[in-house]
Image: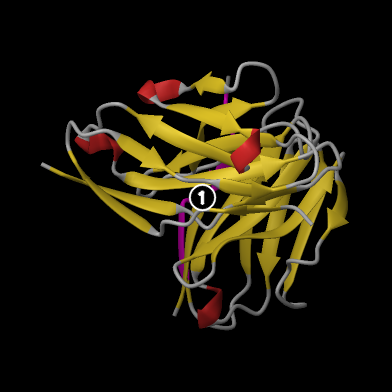
Amino acid sequence: AQSVTQPDIHITVSEGASLELRCNYSYGATPYLFWYVQSPGQGLQLLLKYFSGDTLVQGIKGFEAEFKRSQSSFNLRKPSVHWSDAAEYFCAVGNTGNQFYFGTGTSLTVIP
Amino acid sequence: DAGVIQSPRHEVTEMGQEVTLRCKPISGHDYLFWYRQTMMRGLELLIYFNNNVPIDDSGMPEDRFSAKMPNASFSTLKIQPSEPRDSAVYFCASSPGRGYQPQHFGDGTRLSIL
């Protein structure tokens, strides 16, 4: 069975500091991987996606993620966090078998 | 391009009333999904359609919930009768493919059942 895990329920970082949000997946073949962000009162917005090729993926708003097959991970990173990045972040995994799963989300707080 | 459009954005109604949530997917997207989000249970997939046909409704909590997609540009999620525990944010999303394409979300309907 396929699944996706976000180990951190909540993370607090200082504005200007670097950020890494963890995502681990369980799937036998190469998955399709996504990161979404949800700001308060909004729907989920796609930050980036990985289908194949280069394992370092660039997204919107200065985010990037790296696919590491050996670790079954797809962690989201940003070198310098802005106060407006405070939101809920969801990792998701899909496959060609028409399955798509969201993680439980990581809430990010940014302190001045 | 217009994104997924949901209406209403907010709905407050009394227990026992019928509630209808509406969704217009992105044109050309063959898949439509209904999700419910609460603090306790997170994001839950309720049902999804492919080419207007319901494929998996195993997430629908009970018979009080029903969803339809009469055409490619419109879907409804209905709750009848509504109960306070149905209070949540309901999201509609659409996608050109099921597992290998990203889903595009609407802004949601915040539903409060008094």
Q: Secondary structure at mark 1?
A: loop
Q: Is residue B88 magenta?
A: no
Give the chain letter at badge 1: B
Q: Which residues are magenta?
A: B2-12
Identify the residue under disc 1.
B108
B99 with respect to B7 (left or right): right
**Rendered image quadrant of residue B56:** bottom right
Quadrant (top left, top right, bottom left, bottom right) of the N terminus of chain A: bottom right
Q: Residue at x 81, y 34 (%)?
A: B30
Give the residue at the far front of this rendering. Answer: A70
The one of A37 and B90 positioned closer to us in this rendering: A37
Locate residue B43, reporting x and y percent.
56, 59
Locate residue B11, reporting x and y percent.
47, 62
Asked if A98 appears above or below A10 in the picture, the reply is above
**Rendered image quadrant of residue A9:** bottom left
A38 with respect to A50 (left or right): left
Locate residue B17, reporting x and y percent.
59, 77
Q: Residue at x 41, y 56 (%)?
A: A8
Locate residue A97, reporting x and y percent.
86, 42
Is residue B3 visible to us here? no
